[in-house]
Amino acid sequence: MTSVIPGPLQQPLRFGVYTGVELELQAVDAIPEAAKLGLEPPRFCGQCGRRMVVQVRPHGWDARCSRHGTVDSTELGER
C-alpha cells in the first residue's frame, strides 16, 4: 500500500501560500497586492505551511518544500 504525498500547491490547500497561516485563520486582506496580480511566487507550502526555497527566473519560478517536493510555474500553466 503506497500513499501519495500531495505537492506543495495541490488542492486542497491547508495553508496560505503567501502567508503560511492556516486558511481558516488567515485574514481576507492577508494576500499581498503583488500576489493578487500574479507577480509574486508562492513562498509557503500549501500543505504544511513551511517556508519553501524559491528560485525566480526570467520566465518563471520554481519552489521546493522539504516535505512535499517541487513545483514549477510552467507546470501550473499546463493545468
Image (cartoon, rainbow, N blue to C red):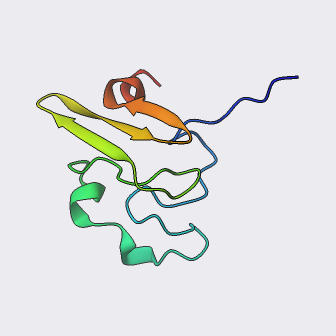
Q: Residue drawn 52% across and 58% down?
A: 49
The answer to whether residue 12 is left or right of residue 50 is right
Relative to 20, is 62 above or below? above
User: Residue 48: x, y in percent?
Assistant: 58, 54
Which quarter of the figure is the N terminus placed in?
Answer: top right
- Residue 8: image location, x then y, percent: 51, 42
**In the depicted structure, whether residue 26 falls above or below residue 63:** below
Residue furthest to the right: 1
Q: Position of residue 24 (x, y in %)?
A: 61, 72
Q: Residue at x 19, y 38 (%)?
A: 56
Q: Residue furthest front?
A: 66
Does 33 appear above or below 12? Answer: below
- The residue positioned 42% from the left and 32% from the top of the image is 71
Question: Dividing the picture into quarters, in which one does residue 2 lie?
Answer: top right
**Residue furthest left as drawn:** 58
Image coords of residue 69 (percent x, y): 50, 33
Q: Which of the 4 quarters of the picture holds residue 67?
A: top right
How many badges with numbers are in the image?
Answer: 0
Name the side, left or right, on which 10 lies relative to 56: right
**In front of the other: 64 or 21:** 64
Q: Residue at x 46, y 64 (%)?
A: 20
Horizontally, is 32 left or right of 45 in the view? left
In-front residue for pair 73/3: 3
- Front-lying residue, 6 or 52: 52
